[in-house]
Image (spheres, rainbow, N blue to C red):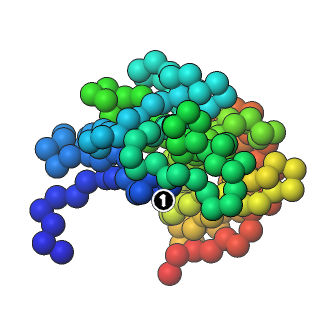
Amino acid sequence: MHASAMTIAYGMTETAPASTLTRIDDPLEIRVSTVGSALPHTEIKIADPETQAAVLRGERGEICTRGYLVMRGYWDDEEATHRAVVNGWMRTGDLVHHGRRGTRERGGPVDGHGDQGRGEHLPREIEELLFTHTSVESVQIVGVPDERLGEELAAFVIAVPGAGVTDDEIRDFCRERLAGSRCRATCSGWRSSP
């Protein structure tokens, strides 16, 4: 592809499309563990998801962006626009850590972290835990519809070939290691990779 280096851009359609970017001269650790720094003419705020007050460096909060790149609004939906854009700040719904050197260390979605009856766990945290299980080859955490909560997290797991792990073993593994986790969802669709 004739690319001498790769960088990570962070954004969303509503912010046309990138708000932050890692740089090719950033140390490798910064390039692979953060979403970089604000792009020119773009402001970034890491805010408490409830109050929208800026959090201190090192704390976790919702990444918000402001500038020329923020959309004017959702088509024919003023209510959704007012929820998403507060005083010019586009609420992304994603959690990050306000890192060193102005970088934003990736976290996870606001919608996928709160108490919401299941404990406070980021999708990334659950994935990383499951990858420590010796019978797990691959994991992907996704949001799935839930009548009571609106959205619930689900883990799609590919077991190591011949491991013979059961859904109860995986559920118990998570329950023991994730404080407050109910692990109430039924695990199904297990398969070993080809």
Relative to 64, say whether 6 is above or below.
below
Within-10-Å neighbours for mark 1: few <14, some 14–19, many 20+ = few
Relative to 2, say whether 143 is above or below.
above
Q: Relative to the observer, which residue lies in front, 136 or 139? A: 139
**Who's the residue at 38% across and 46% down the image?**
68
Q: Relative to the observer, which residue lies in front, 35 or 117? A: 35
Residue 76's image quarter?
bottom right
Q: Tell which residue pokes out farthest to the top in this image.
A: 56
Q: Position of residue 40 (x, y in %)?
A: 26, 42
The amino acid type found where label 1 is placed reads Thr
**Who's the residue at 30% across and 40% down the image?**
41
Residue highlighted by disc 1 = 13
The kind of secondary structure element at disc 1 is helix
**Who's the residue at 20% across and 46% down the image?**
23
**Who's the residue at 58% across and 42% down the image?**
85
Residue 111's image quarter?
top right
Q: Tell which residue pokes out farthest to the bottom in this image.
A: 194
Relative to 117, say whether 168 is above or below.
below
Looking at the rendered image, the quarter that the N terminus falls into is bottom left
